[in-house]
Image: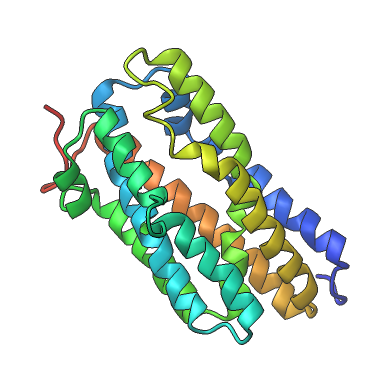
Amino acid sequence: MTTMPMAPDALEAALRAIGAERYHIHHPFHRLLHDGRCTRAQVQAWALNRYYYQAMIPVKDASLLARLPTPELRREWRRRIEDHDGVAGKPGGIERWIKLAEGVGLDRAMVESAGLILPQTRFAVDAYVHFVREKSVLEAIASSLTELFSPTIIAERVSGMIRNYDWIDEDTLAYFTPRLTQAPQDSDFALAYVKEHARTIDQQQAVLAALRFKCDVLWSQLDGLYLAYVSPGMIPPGAFVPA
């Protein structure tokens, strides 16, 4: 076991190695979805369950915002909330995700209620909100670093779904266009913060654990979708049952 803290660039390399191993781009459900091998019902289940994650992002960010010590940090994190909640006259990511869900054939009210999501989705997303609320500011910011890897999955998702599903078009997937610039901006800031403030061995191990945890949150959501809607097809009581 190392007895010296990593240099900042070595810490970044360790963080990126976690993404290379654990990011949900490798999950079997992701591969089915983006290779055009999901049914319409399976795509609907994905859109419905993913909405709960999207809707809770500004909730977890608001809990972190309240603990940030400087106006500069609060302004940065407030921008993230506005990206998802929107601002006056400009819809945010949550509204764009609802449009995606409607585009694949779901009812808006049903999606917004989150009443038919999988228990795995609810447990995983709620665990993420609690993590950000309860852990240190450093760990909370580090947990957002899955955004380092999101441009790759977004590009693959959009091109693959438009190519493989003739009932999905660019308007349906408009949620993702702003994220191609928002996510790198968010991750650049978070990475710089973590590299500057994770100075001790304990702090560095904590931020690495935070990123592993967040990867597990994303992976477990796809586990739930695969088990319920692909194989063995065990839809839990009270969850969405495709028509």
Location of the N terminus (image quadrant): bottom right
Residue name at image x 50 percent, y 76 percent = 64
Left or right: 8 in relation to 224: right
Q: Relative to residue 38, is residue 237 depicted above or below?
A: below
* Location of residue 243 (image quadrant): top left
Q: Position of residue 233 (x, y in %)?
A: 23, 32
* Location of residue 6 (image quadrant): bottom right
Q: Nearer the viewer, residue 198 or 91?
A: 91
* Location of residue 202 (image quadrant): bottom right
Residue name at image x 36 percent, y 51 percent = 94
Residue ranking furthest to the front? 89
Left or right: 221 in relation to 144: left
One can see residue 114 in this view: no
Q: Position of residue 157 (x, y in %)?
A: 50, 29
Residue name at image x 61 percent, y 40 percent = 151
One can see residue 107 in this view: yes
Q: Nearer the viewer, residue 61 or 205?
A: 61
Q: How is the image coloured?
A: rainbow
Q: Position of residue 193 (x, y in %)?
A: 72, 70
Q: Relative to residue 187, is residue 153 depicted above or below?
A: above
- Count of marks, rendered view: 0
Q: Nearer the viewer, residue 186 or 226?
A: 186
Q: Relative to residue 209, is residue 136 depicted above or below?
A: below
